[in-house]
Image (cartoon, grey):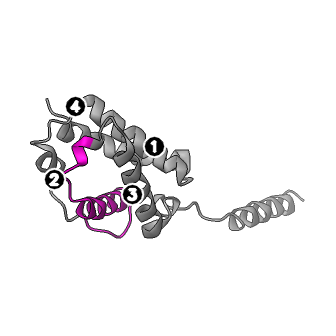
């Protein structure tokens, strides 16, 4: 009898496990390449409308920036992409980015992720991966 109960319990547990869908990858949670492209478009619209930082983007090649941001976010969320841009230190060396500028851009990114319906847990995972870039972006 004990053996029969054990077998039934194991069968029920295995059946329950088999019915669970695998957890989506971070790349999938961001909507894969099309979702990342839409996120970057949303982000750039917000940045260009943000009076705190939009002047810093007046002379920027927005097509190139868009393409590099898509690559960078794709890489950071584990997608099948390659980042082809310069390092963050090289890209920001002469820009005198302040802590306030950096924080404004992060706020715009969070707002863009919210607008795109990206789950909060996925947002936090991306932000944790991007956070180490702070030291290469903000001027000392």
Q: Tell me how far mark 1 sits from mark 4, CA to CA.
A: 19 Å
Report the mark closest to the observer, 2 or 1: 1
Question: Which percent across, then down, holds residue 49?
Answer: 38, 45
**SS majority, magenta:** helix
Disc ID at residue 40: 3
Q: Tell me the residue at 80%/59% (across/down).
A: 9
Q: How many residues crowd around disc 1 within 10 Å: few (fewer than 14), some, or many (20 or more)? A: some
Check if mark 1's residue and mark 4's residue have beta carbons within 8 Å: no
- Residue 89 shown in magenta: no
Q: Tell me the residue at 55%/62% (across/down).
A: 24
Q: Tell me how far mark 2 sits from mark 1, CA to CA.
A: 22 Å
Disc ID at residue 87: 2
Q: Quarter holding the C terminus?
A: top left
- Residue 61 shown in magenta: yes
User: Viewer-proximal residue, 125 or 139?
Assistant: 139
User: Viewer-proximal residue, 7 or 68?
Assistant: 68
Q: Secondary structure at mark 1?
A: helix
Q: Tell me the residue at 35%/57% (across/down).
A: 73
Left or right, 53 with reference to 32: left
Q: Earlier in the sequence, mark 2 or mark 1?
A: 2
Q: Which residue is mark 1?
A: 110
Q: Earlier in the sequence, mark 3 or mark 2?
A: 3
Question: Which percent across, then down, holds residue 104?
Answer: 35, 36
Q: Which residues are magenta?
A: 55-82
């Amino acid at each position: 009898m004990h053996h029969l109960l054990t077998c039934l319990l194991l069968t029920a547990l295995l059946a329950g496990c088999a019915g669970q869908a695998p957890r989506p990858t971070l790349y999938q949670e961001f909507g894969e390449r099309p979702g990342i492209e839409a996120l970057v478009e949303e982000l750039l619209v917000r940045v260009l409308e943000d009076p705190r930082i939009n002047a810093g983007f007046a002379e920027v090649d927005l097509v190139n920036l868009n393409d590099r941001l898509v690559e960078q976010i794709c890489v950071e969320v584990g997608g099948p992409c390659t980042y082809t841009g310069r390092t963050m230190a090289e890209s920001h060396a002469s820009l005198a980015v302040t802590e306030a500028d950096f924080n404004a851009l992060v706020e715009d990114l969070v707002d863009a992720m919210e607008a795109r319906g990206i789950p909060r847990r996925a947002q936090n995972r991306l932000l944790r991966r991007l956070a180490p870039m702070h030291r290469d972006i903000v001027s000392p």
